[in-house]
Image (spheres, rainbow, N blue to C red):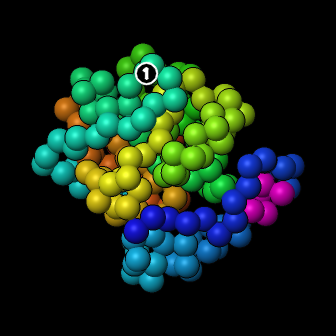
Amino acid sequence: MRCSPTKRTTSWGSGVTRTIEAVALALTVAAGAAGCGGKAADAPVGTSSAASGERVAYEFESLDDRAVTSEAMHGRPTVLTFVQLGSALSQAQVEYIVAMAKNDASQTNYAVVALEPRSNRELLELYVKTLDVTFPAALADEATLNGAGGFGEWHGVPTTIVLDRVGRVLWRADGRVATSTELRNAMRSM
């Protein structure tokens, strides 16, 4: 089942408006009302550090010629951030990832994947430009949108996943903003 944001916007207002939206959305997520996958009340919003034993195969439609696939990302740690374009928390997570990529994009793969239908491609292009994203951005495939892809069900957005060098899930944060410290600690544990 696909996540649906409670409010969809295509522009980002003043800092006050963004803060109010972020607080409102955070409260909604904490209350379990913004969960995904049909499990809102029981959804674990938080962090998992259990590495899966199997490599996750994925292939997402990139906005440009930089592939967002398990093959292209193989060999280096990978940070995948799954977002929805109308989510203030997703925007905040992308801003963290953009700052991290400026410092260590040569050692780590970064990508943002929008949990949006293909019809929102132009909105994703605007989102990437507005947030000054320098790493690949892509649209999720239908299986991933429905929680049937290699990353399983969505328990909130943003969801940030750290993969090891061979593509196994090392760490995952669902429905909240993962800090750069948390992400770096997860990558150090490899």
Q: Is residue 75 left or right of residue 44?
A: left
Residue 187 appears in the rendering = no
Amino acid residing under circle 1: Arg
Residue 80 in picture, x, y percent from top left: 41, 40
Please rate how many residues cluster around mark 1, counting C-alpha atoms within 10 Å: few if below 14, some from 14 to 19, many from 20.
some
Question: Of all residues shown, which one is farthest toward the left?
Answer: 53
Q: Where does the N terminus fall, quadrant-wise? A: bottom left
- Relative to 29, is 47 above or below? above
- Relative to 88, is 60 above or below? above
Residue 135 vs residue 15, the one in the foreground = 135
Question: Which segment is the magenta one?
Answer: 17-21
Q: Is residue 15 left or right of residue 126?
A: right
Q: Residue at x 85, y 55 (%)?
A: 16
Residue 186 in picture, x, y percent from top left: 35, 43
Question: Of all residues shown, which one is farthest toward the top?
Answer: 106
- Relative to 151, is 134 above or below? above
Q: Helix, strand or loop at disc 1?
A: loop
Q: Residue at x 13, y 48 (%)?
A: 53
Residue 145 appears in the rendering = yes
Q: Is residue 65 left or right of residue 86?
A: left
Q: Residue at x 69, y 60 (%)?
A: 8
Q: Which residue is mark 1?
A: 66
Residue 170 in picture, x, y percent from top left: 27, 46
Q: Quadrant of residue 29?
A: bottom right
Query: Does 139 appear in magenta?
Result: no
- Relative to 89, is 161 above or below? above
